[in-house]
Image (cartoon, helix red, strand yellow):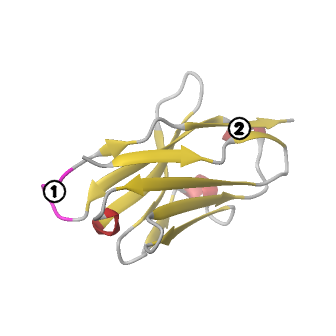
């Protein structure tokens, strides 16, 4: 079982920035592919960005150049730096972990953190 805890959400004005963090409470956090998802009101949950154990990253087209995912293996954390935020980025942001090997443990979800961007 992997416990994930997100932090860093809040209220920000349009054009502002926020940095979300996901802390993973397991001794083997480093072998998990970590992803950020978001779910806006009335919409389906969607993938925002991923980072592998080898720190390869991937982004949804809608956030490329605006969001940056990073990982600190020593601290068992994954961050999502979000710049130039817009009201349409308002959502609950979730951290997700899946073991890197096919059929491995997971997926695990954090409880989410609310991001609200005011116009």
The residue depicted at 32 percent of the width and 57 percent of the height is: 26
Residue under the point 45% across and 74% down: 74
User: Residue drawn at (67%, 66%), measured in percent from left and top?
Assistant: 65
The C terminus, quarter of image: top right
State whether the magenta stretch is mostly helix, strand or loop.
loop
User: Residue 30 occupies which quadrant of the picture?
Assistant: bottom left
Return the x and y of residue 5 as percentages of the image width and height: 48, 45
Residue 47 visible, this orientation: no
Instruction: Name the residue tied to disc 1.
Output: 104
In magenta stretch: residue 91: no
Quote the CA–CA distance across marks 1 and 2: 34 Å
43 sits left or right of 28 in the view? right
Residue 61: percent from left, percent from top: 56, 57
**Residue extending farthest top:** 42
Residue furthest toward the left?
103
Q: Work out whether 49 lies above or below 7.
A: below
Which quadrant of the view contains residue 81?
A: bottom right
Circle 1 or circle 2, nearest the eye: 1
Task: Return the residue nearer the eye: 60 or 29.
Answer: 29
- The crowd level at tag 2 (other Cα within 10 Å; few <14, some 14-19, many 20+) is few
> How many residues crowd mark 1 within 10 Å: few (<14), some (14–19), many (20+)?
few
Left or right relative to 58: residue 7: right
Quadrant of res 103? bottom left
From the viewer's perspective, is residue 41 above or below residue 107? above
Q: Which mark is residue 62?
A: none
For disc 2, the marked residue is 88
- Give, as a single range, the part of the protein colored magenta: 101-105
Question: Could you say whether the residue bearing mark 2 is in a helix, strand or loop?
Answer: helix
């Amino acid at each position: 079982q992997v416990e994930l805890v997100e932090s860093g959400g809040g209220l920000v004005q349009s054009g502002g920035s926020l940095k979300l963090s996901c802390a993973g409470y397991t001794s083997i956090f480093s072998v998990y592919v970590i992803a950020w998802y978001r779910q806006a009101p009335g919409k389906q949950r969607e993938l925002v960005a991923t980072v592998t154990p080898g720190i390869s990253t991937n982004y949804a087209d809608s956030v490329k150049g605006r969001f940056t995912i990073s990982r600190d293996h020593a601290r068992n954390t994954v961050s999502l730096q979000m710049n130039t935020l817009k009201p349409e980025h308002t959502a609950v942001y979730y951290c997700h972990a899946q073991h890197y090997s096919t059929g491995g443990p997971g997926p695990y979800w954090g409880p989410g953190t609310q991001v609200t961007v005011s116009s």
